[in-house]
Amino acid sequence: MTTLQKPLNRPGQPTQPLGAATRLTGAATLVAVAVLAVVVWTAVQLYLVAPDSGGWRWVLIAIAILGVIGALAPFSPARNAFQSRSAAVRAVADGDGPAIRKYRSRMRNSAWVCLGGCLTVLVLCAFVLFLLANNHAVQRTFFQPAMISRSWFEVTKAFGRNIFIAVVAEIIVLVWGLVLALARLAPGRAGRSIASLATAYIDAFRAVPAIIVIYLVGFGLPLAHFPVLSSLSPTGAAILALSLTYGAYVAEVYRAGIESVHWSQPAAARSLGLSHGLSMRYVVVPQAVRRVIPPLLNDFIGLQKDTALVTVIGTVDGFTQAKIYSSNYFNLSSVTVVAALFVIVTIPQTRFVDRLLARDQRRMSR
Amino acid sequence: MSFLQIQDLVKSYDDTPVLRSVSLDVDQHEVVCLIGASGSGKSTLLRCINSLEEIDGGEVWLDDQLVSGEGTDVDQLRRDVGIVFQSFNLFPHMTVQQNITLAPRKIRGLADRVANDRAAELLQRVGLADKASTYPDQLSGGQQQRVAIVRALAMDPRVLLLDEITSALDPELVAEVLDIVRGLAHDGLTMLLATHEMSFAREVASTVCFLHAGTILEQGPPEQMFGDPQEERTKAFLHSVTAAGRL
């Protein structure tokens, strides 16, 4: 009988030497030292400009100290790498193949963690250096504390206009987009012409830039003396224009959602005797809407950002107000404020939608 | 004239003929089992009967009414002819109760309370009285299929079509669904079922039809079909089914 059993001398795979991993660990440590040097130099620069930054001086000094502490972080994985190396060397002495592989792999992983941390610190440091360049002219242009304190209140107040436009337009878009999507999917021969019309609308308004639609609606309708529409306020015109444009986008999102519902669902509904309309209303659309909430939020964030375009028709929104400050004082810090406001309103929505979806999912499947 | 009469039904998908002249008479309270290999046209035949598929030729008559062709009120037809699918097709965003009462409420205009009471009664009958407010994804396959049967029954159909309703189930769940069908047969509901469960067909069918390549090659009472089939194809099919341990 031939022996099929391999002699079980613990190493199952060939074991490579430690050289490459050791070199990687050494290199990572050297990089960490170099990055620390750069960070310390940057911190010194920050400390030097701190005195002429008024009330913000302690903030700058705090950033400098935190930066140096952050630059020390990559040394922790570097130390782990060296500890793993010692263990690996011991394993080599013992001839324990699996242990060699384990510690060599830990060594490499730790070295890469160290390098990743170094890269992150370096990028952040480069950003600070950019702000400090040219005797911190960049920082003074975009983040001047005095300008921020002077403008933030008025800018934030005017930003309420952006929020108003966005909220009203979003409500209109939710309905208008669904109407367009259902028109585009109108069944049968009778629906064909309606479907082509809806398709033409969607194609047109997805193609034309929102800024042009706002311009045409905002200036064009009053010029045309069209009843009712020509007397719209600039805010009303902005809401109308954004609803027209984003209705087209959202219609496509709805359509994708409706088409993603498996055909067996409407088939089951129709087999119970429900008409096309009823099966859409109770079976297809409710499932489609659940699926399109994330892409819908995407379009809504786009809409919210595009409210800043209303500045072209003279609506005083947050951006317009910020521009008034920036041109009067020749400084862009007020515009930074409005940019920050957009970030602040967007982030909670994303989290909210994530939680909403998770809750809905839990309800139906547990 | 028979209660449900299918005459020379023809159906093709694009250029592929699926049903070539199928004729079948079903009397009231009869249970007809359609057997045959996959692709022989069993499912298509069922789907043509309640107009889920448009037919290319032939006629379907239900209780002396022509229910196929141009101008048929398909929504009315489907209230009379219910269908249960292989893959259940319950509505995942609705509770069991909502699944069952949707059509009675929206089409029959039943009040919520009346529809709910009826749903509870039917659920009781299939042993799922406690599941009214759960969602389909929280149920086992066998439970989902029982709910799907109840959903079809809630419209009080005059004919029930069952399209391989146990094929998607784990073997240990098949019996609980077949028990329900057995009960319905006992109560005298007219049914057509496409099935691979031969022993079940033998037990409940009044007529067994063997479909092959889009035609009913042979039909007869189960004793004859399973005990003494005449056609070579039928013999071969039953032989392979027996070899697979399904009879």
Image: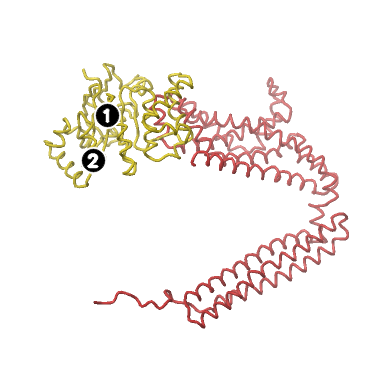
Chain colours: A red, B yellow
B140 w.r.t. A238: above or below: below
Q: In which quarter of the image is residue A54?
A: bottom right
Disc 2 on helix, strand or loop? loop
Disc 1 on helix, strand or loop? strand
The amino acid type, in three-letter code, at marker 2 is Ala
Cα–Cα span, label 1 and label 2: 17 Å
Q: In which quarter of the image is residue B195?
A: top left
Which of the pair A230/A100 is nearer the observer?
A100
Disc nearest the viewer among 1 and 2: 1
Measuring from the top left, give residue A261's x and y in whole percent. Answer: 46, 37
Furthest toward the top, the residue is B64
Residue A81, numbered circle: none
- Residue at left offset 67%, top offset 43%: A346
Residue B155 horizontal side relative to residue A73, left or right: left
Measuring from the top left, give residue A297's x and y in whole percent. Answer: 60, 40
Quadrant of the frame with the N terminus of chain A:
bottom left
Measuring from the top left, give residue A334's x and y in whole percent. Answer: 80, 46
The amino acid type, in three-letter code, at marker 1 is Leu
Residue B158 horizontal side relative to residue A190, left or right: left
Residue designated by label 2: B37
Residue designated by label 1: B192
Residues behind callouts 1 and 2 on a single chain: yes
B49 w.r.t. A309: above or below: above
Tell me the subunit letter for badge 2.
B
Q: Which of the two labelled residues, at mark 1 and mark 2, occupies the earlier sequence position?
A: 2
Q: Quadrant of residue B230?
A: top left
Measuring from the top left, give residue A156's x and y in whole percent. Answer: 78, 40
